[in-house]
Image (cartoon, rainbow, N blue to C red):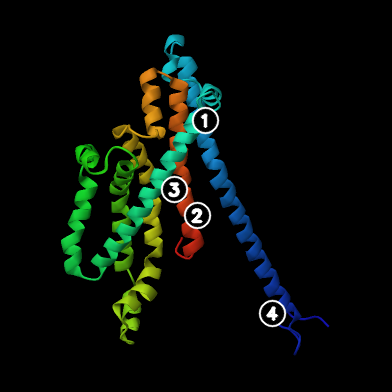
Amino acid sequence: MTVPTGTTPAGDTTAVVDTGSTTELAVAAARKRRRRSRSFVSFAAPLVVLGIVIGLWYLVTYAILDEGRRFLMPAPHRVVTDGLLGSAAPSMWEALGRTTTVALTGLAIAAVIGIVWAVVMSQSRMMETALFPYAVVLQCIPILALVPLVGFWFGFGFSARVFVCVLIALFPIVSNTLFGLRSVDRQMRDLFALHHPSRLTVLRKLEFPAAMPAIFAGLRISAGLSVVGAIVGDFFFKQGNPGIGILIDNYRSRLQSEELFASIVLASLLGVAVFWLFGRLGNRIVGRWYQR
């Protein structure tokens, strides 16, 4: 018996089911191909840019600079062999570990202070008006202007470096957390208001979950800034165990260009690693529901 197009015998749903299943499989396959394509592009595109940068680096070193001036920009393979794998490598890794400790300590303190600060401001417009200008002031004050005071208060060692990290990393956490807490959907607030919850309940069950994407966005920004703060602290406070910033300054003064470039590369990779870590942590905790 031949079944007309678009119809089936009574009780026979095989054709409809098969058509629906085929369509679903085709859509799933198309989505899988798109995900693979995006993954490949996200992996390959940075490598292409890196290859272009390294090629330009070699061009400057060997085609533009004279042989006597190549110490200004040593070739990438010299940076790896003489710098990252040379005799100074152990001291670089030790200094990088100290800088990492300072950066993460400062970031943790900044996160606690910044989130508490933003929560206090979110509870009252008067508190926001009173406190937010001082967050802006901390962001705008040049760190160099505070160096004498920081030295008087905390000395010139670990505490002073951590304090500089906190100052540099604080504002993004405050501003992003406050934005997240203030941007809760009005209808959700009205729904919660029907049950007359306490402020603590609203903060814990509504505002904080809604603000988590913004909080982690601020943490990602502050994570990179904390590494900058640790290196800046090394430049300003040169006592105690040396961090990567002190080594950079020493290599600069001694014209050790391979070691100088290698230490700069390590410092940059540290910033990228911390930024990536908090990005992954945010995706794990918050999930991908807010990403478009």
Where is residue 200 shown, x and y percent of the image? 32, 76
Q: Are marks 3 and 1 in contact (CB under 8 Å)?
A: no
- Residue on which the image places disc 2: 280
Residue 147 quadrant: top left
User: What's under tag 4, amino acid-wise?
Assistant: Gly
- The residue labelled by disc 1 is 90
From the image, state whether disc 3 or disc 1 is nearer to you: 1
Label 4 element class: loop
Q: Is residue 146 above or below residue 187?
A: above
Q: What residue would you read off at disc 4?
A: 6
Q: Is residue 51 above or below residue 24?
A: above
Q: Secondary structure at mark 2?
A: helix
Q: Position of residue 162 (x, y in %)?
A: 33, 45
Badge 3 or badge 1: first in the primary sequence? 1
Q: Nearer the viewer, residue 269 or 26?
A: 269
The disc, 4 or 3, on the residue closer to the chain's N-terminal end is 4
Counting the numbered discs, the total is 4
Marks 4/3: CA–CA distance:
55 Å
* Residue occupied by mark 3: 275
Q: Nearer the viewer, residue 34 or 151?
A: 151
Badge 2 amino acid: Arg
Q: Could you tell me residue 43's position as x and y percent?
A: 56, 45
Disc 1 to disc 4, C-alpha distance = 74 Å
Instruction: Report how far apart the C-alphas of labels 2 and 3 lie in the structure.
Output: 9 Å
The residue sitting at 35% across, 71% down in the picture is 207
Q: Say which quarter of the image contains residue 71.
A: top left
Up-down: is 249 above or below 97?
above
Left or right: residue 203 versus residue 140 is right
As measured in the structure, the alpha-carbon distance from the residue carrying label 2 to the one carrying label 4 is 49 Å
